[in-house]
Image: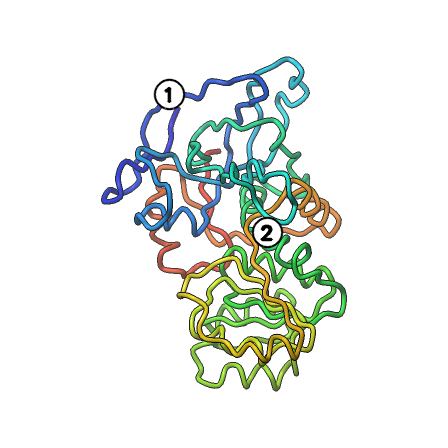
């Protein structure tokens, strides 16, 4: 089969022939129609991720058709159109991932290939209103944003929400989830075009985080936030406690611009704020996310598609952070 292979940290991705996976009982083989990139894939390609092994087939997001099953009891999935939950072995607690938790695409071979194997428990029916590239865009970023907003931050209709760094996959999904839930949403971005795109998708307003007074602008616009969703951290994070309403929740799931700076703890206990960390999500989170997508007929935002053989170009685009929404590889 064809697969996109990372052979070493100093080499670009290459599309080459590799062996098709063999199945054990409880596993299925999915013929991938589309696979989406995540920031995780980019970090792996530049050697800045834990547990990298070579060679590797990356890719956590995929949608396709089940072509083989490892045991007869799983025959009901044959020829079904599916998406794959990449959050594997989350663990016995719904509050945090266990020691055996792993994400599809490292250490196990992922979706940047003609075929991928996964366990039957991680299969879900592809939402009927989505095409292949839209469905493939959904799993990792959609799940991460859904758990952050609803499981962790307990978002509800009427809440005022700030999405930091809209335009990335997770930020774009967080915007879509919050708008669909009836929240009043504000965004930040370094791009005026991305802020305008977010406004067209239902955000009330946004500010450019490169402006020195970005936090003051938000305070005037929104008067305070019940929920802040952030995946950047860095120096700007210090402004968030001031922007929160009493009882506000700050949810984090990334650190693309650095660590959490010095914070005034008095603001946290006096305003009774919560700082919540999250990673991926449980099986129940994934099922709830899909139900939400189907209920509201949400369509993931796809920025650009590339042929599977052009995966290196897709990764380079992600490295430039120019996209709004997801970058998808097609294998139609």
Residue identifier under label 1: 19
Seen from the viewer's position, the closer of residues 101 and 203 is 101
Q: Residue at x 43, y 70 (%)?
A: 234
Callout 2 secondary element = loop
Is the residue 9 above or below the residue 20 in the image? Answer: below
Seen from the viewer's position, the closer of residues 215 and 261 is 261
Q: Residue furthest left?
A: 10
Q: Position of residue 85 (x, y in %)?
A: 58, 38
Check disc 2: other Cα within 10 Å, few if <14, some if 14-19, many if 20+: many
- Colour style of the rendered protein structure: rainbow
Residue identifier under label 2: 300
Seen from the viewer's position, the closer of residues 106 and 68 is 106
Q: Position of residue 178 (x, y in %)?
A: 67, 62
Seen from the viewer's position, the closer of residues 96 and 198 is 96
Check disc 1: other Cα within 10 Å, few if <14, some if 14-19, many if 20+: few
The dot on residue 141 is none
Q: Position of residue 188 (x, y in %)?
A: 52, 72
Q: Residue furthest top?
A: 72
Q: Residue at x 64, y 49 (%)?
A: 95
Q: Residue at x 60, y 68 (%)?
A: 228
Q: Residue at x 48, y 77 (%)?
A: 208
Q: Is residue 164 left or right of residue 320?
A: right
Q: Is residue 100 left or right of residue 11?
A: right
Q: Quadrant of residue 108?
A: top left
Is the residue 250 above or below the residue 139 in the image? Answer: below
Q: Earlier in the sequence, mark 2 or mark 1?
A: 1
Give how far apart the Cα atoms at labels 2 and 1 are: 32 Å
Q: Position of residue 181 (x, y in %)?
A: 73, 60
Pair 2/1: label in front: 1
Quarter of the image for the N terminus: give it.
top left
Callout 1 secondary element = loop
Is the residue 160 above or below the residue 285 in the image? Answer: below
């Amino acid at each position: 089969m064809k697969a996109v292979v990372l052979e070493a940290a100093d080499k670009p991705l290459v599309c080459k022939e590799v062996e098709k996976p063999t199945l054990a009982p409880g596993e299925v083989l999915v013929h991938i129609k589309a696979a989406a990139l995540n920031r995780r894939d980019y970090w792996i390609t530049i050697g800045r991720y834990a547990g990298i092994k070579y060679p590797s087939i990356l890719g956590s997001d995929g949608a396709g058709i089940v072509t083989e099953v490892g045991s007869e009891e799983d025959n009901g999935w044959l020829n079904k159109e599916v998406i794959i939950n990449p959050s594997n072995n989350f663990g016995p607690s719904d509050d945090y991932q266990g020691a055996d938790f792993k994400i599809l695409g490292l250490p196990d071979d992922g979706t940047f290939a003609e075929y991928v194997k996964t366990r039957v428990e991680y299969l879900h029916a592809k939402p009927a209103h989505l095409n292949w590239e839209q469905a493939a865009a959904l799993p990792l970023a959609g799940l991460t944003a859904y758990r952050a907003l609803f499981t962790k931050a307990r978002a509800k209709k009427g809440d005022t929400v700030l999405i930091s760094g809209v335009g990335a996959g997770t930020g774009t999904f967080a915007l879509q989830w919050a708008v669909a839930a009836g929240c009043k949403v504000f965004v930040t971005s370094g791009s005026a075009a991305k802020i305008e795109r977010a406004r067209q998708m239902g955000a009330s307003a946004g500010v450019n985080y490169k402006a020195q007074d970005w936090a003051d602008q938000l305070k005037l616009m929104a008067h305070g936030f019940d929920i802040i969703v952030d995946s950047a951290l860095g120096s700007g994070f210090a402004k968030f406690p001031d922007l929160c309403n009493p009882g506000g929740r700050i949810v984090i799931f990334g650190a693309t611009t650095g660590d959490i700076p010095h914070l005034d703890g008095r603001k946290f206990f006096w305003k009774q704020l919560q700082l919540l960390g999250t990673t991926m999500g449980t099986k129940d989170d994934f099922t709830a996310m899909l139900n939400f997508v189907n209920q509201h007929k949400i369509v993931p935002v796809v920025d650009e598609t590339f042929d599977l053989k052009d995966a290196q170009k897709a990764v380079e685009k992600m490295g430039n952070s120019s996209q709004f929404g997801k970058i998808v590889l097609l294998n139609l």
